[in-house]
Amino acid sequence: MIRSLTLSPLLFLSVPLAAGMPARAADEAPAEVLPALTVEAQRRTQAAVDVPISLRALTGDEVEARGIRDLGDAFEATPNTDLRSQRGGMDAATVSIRGVSSTAFGVDPAVAIYMDDVFIGSDGGFQVPLYDVEQIEILRGPQGTLYGRNALGGAVNLRSRRPDPEAGVGGYLRLGFGEDVTRQAETAVNLPLGSDAALRLSARGDLAHGRVDNRAGTGDPADMDDLAGRAQLLLRPGELTEVLVAVDHLRDRSNPAAYGEYDRVWDEGVNQAIPFEGALDTSGASLRLSHDLGWASVEGVTAWRSTDAKGDGGDFTASPLRVNGYDRDHDQMTQEVRLVSAPGGALDWTAGIFLLRAQDDRYEYTGLSAALPADILFPGQPAIPYPYREGTRSQIDSTSLAGFGDVTWHAGDRLDLIAGARAGWDRREIDYDHRSNVAGMTLGAPAQKRSARIDGTDLSPRVGASWALTPETRVYATISRGYKAGGFNVSFAQGAALSYEPESAWNYEIGVKGEVLDGRLGFAASAFWMDWRDQQVYSFDGYALSIANAPRSRSIGAEVELTARPLPGLDLFAGLGLLDARFTDYPNITVGVDGDGNRQPLASRTSLSLGAEYREPVMEAADAVVRIDWNWRSAFYYDAANTMREPAYGLVNLRTGIDGGNWGLFFRVANLFDTAHRALAAQQAAGIHAIPGQPRTVGIEGVLRF
């Protein structure tokens, strides 16, 4: 079984930097209108209401108030989106926006994720800890024009708090303690280095014993053991020039793979004779240069990122017979140069080039921990000696080059016309070698050693128009195309043909955004239809991971989001997502089975997010604060064959306490009603297994600010 109240009692002590984590002093009168929200969704700073894209922006303050620890938590609070980790932890995450996802481990994502202007090419770098966050922007719908070849379903723009030479010295420290020897820490410090330079250091760590019982007695999974850090140096060598150098690293030794029997894992925990143990290390370095030319600014981002992921263990059952593992080393270099127009003219435009070089070295294996006589596993099975290991070594080299441009013409006082395009070229090469340590014997896939190469080109345009109904309200209509490059089946391939084709989608969207009631109510609504061709679909039979193209799919839906401040001190949020994402032409989804009409994985028909926060002065310079959030989603499937169904569930999170401006004390509960749900389900060699979701978790949070 899983143990609720795992993090109770939890004490956080926090000393946030005023410039890095601004907080309203409690003796100030609460604003009676909604705060202005700006985003960088179109690679330039704009008011969110002026951006003709369906998006969800979470500020750093909201990230803290909601208790968002990673991107999965942010997606949980965003309608028509989902994010699941393949092993329940920080690596191999699957991202879904409007039903568009890649459910395979270690392949190109269908959603482009950028962290501080750097493209994250490995899914092992998606579900990383969030700390010292400025803002999270989740963009729905194809964003290929500005975000590239993998922005088929949408894009995520993560921004960290930056060094500030004018903010003074300050920082924050957050510490946590709880049951199961839980310890958590987060810290950041801003250090001005004169009037034109500053250094910002940030770090976070988590440590806890496993929260899921293992009936085999070989160690409880779902523990935490991670440490992450980031350093940023900001330099202004001239009045018009800025340089930002950043490095970051994550070390994760958690054991999150708490796979148990699909229908029993929540109540009974797991029964793993050989627990799966993994290690994840991600590192990055970037150099960002910007210079103001007057009529435009030129921005260049040069970056390197590396992800090293390893794992070894059993098959998540009580039998020690079978062992499995993987070793993946992904390295990438990216270069992007953008020219962005100065604001205030008749044209707002962005133009640039993007280059990516990446190498992915992988080894994935399965094996047996004992010799087996013939005909034990299946009729005709030969006698298998000990030790037996069978696996695939593959090296994938990728090159991507693209040029892009996007322009908004303010054709009149109320009319904006939008046009853009991205032209790209991709090349991929693979060296593939599948074999076992026993000459002439393979059980999971044919023995073969092959090399292959694929090239592809693409043009992804965007056109649209926006009309101001009033100074505070705009309607828009856009047509855009998204693209995802072709690739290879990189392990346990069942045939000699390793490659699969690119996929693409046209998205047709209308929307409205604005504010009414003198700025007390903000709203955004959108409706879309997506025509999807050659979708890359993942399947797994317990041995072989296979990706093939489904000829045609579609996604139809809508999003509605409301933010309101009806009274001073009371903030409300409501978000609704409606989605019908299906395969419309998918013959032979499995042997002899037609997949036409099947629902897309991770695509709930309805998703709902409600939140409320209320502040009331209770003493001199102090407010009582109550916040409650409810995130609900209807039933969905984990797989394209629609065999693994997750029933509808909703999670309630609570935060209440006293905020004195410079100090605070809060009581926090995640999953207040201890609602049973799964974090992930997957086909394994021994059948369908699942990882339980987070149980009720209680904590106390203390805050000091100066």
Image (spheres, rainbow, N blue to C red):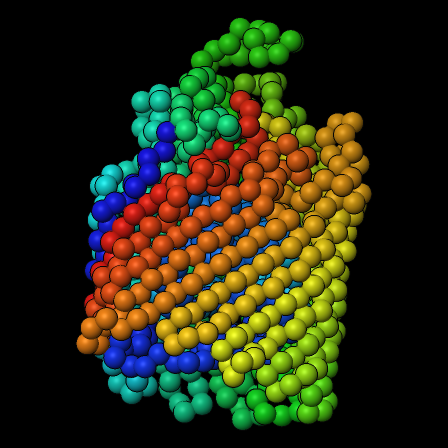
- Quarter of the figure with residue 550: top right
- Quarter of the figure with residue 423: bottom right
176 shown above or below 335: above
Left or right of residue 561: residue 5: left
- Quarter of the figure with residue 321: top left
- In this view of the protein, which residue sits in the foreground, 666 or 288? 666
Q: Identify the residue at image location x=72%, y=46%.
A: 582
Q: Is residue 215 in view? A: yes
Q: Position of residue 455 (x, y in %)?
A: 72, 54
376 shown above or below 591: above
441 shown above or below 276: above
Q: Position of residue 124 (x, y in %)?
A: 48, 49
Locate the C terminus by quadrant: bottom left
Left or right of residue 496: residue 179: left
Q: Identify the residue at image location x=62%, y=80%.
A: 473
- In this view of the protein, which residue sits in the foreground, 627 or 548? 627
Q: Position of residue 19 (x, y in %)?
A: 31, 77
Q: Identify the residue at image location x=42%, y=63%.
A: 612
Left or right of residue 676: residue 3: left
Q: Position of residue 119 (x, y in %)?
A: 53, 62
Q: Identify the residue at image location x=39%, y=52%.
A: 653
Q: Residue furthest left?
A: 620
Q: Is residue 200 in view? A: no
Locate the N terminus by quadrant: top left
- In this view of the protein, which residue sits in the foreground, 190 or 311? 190
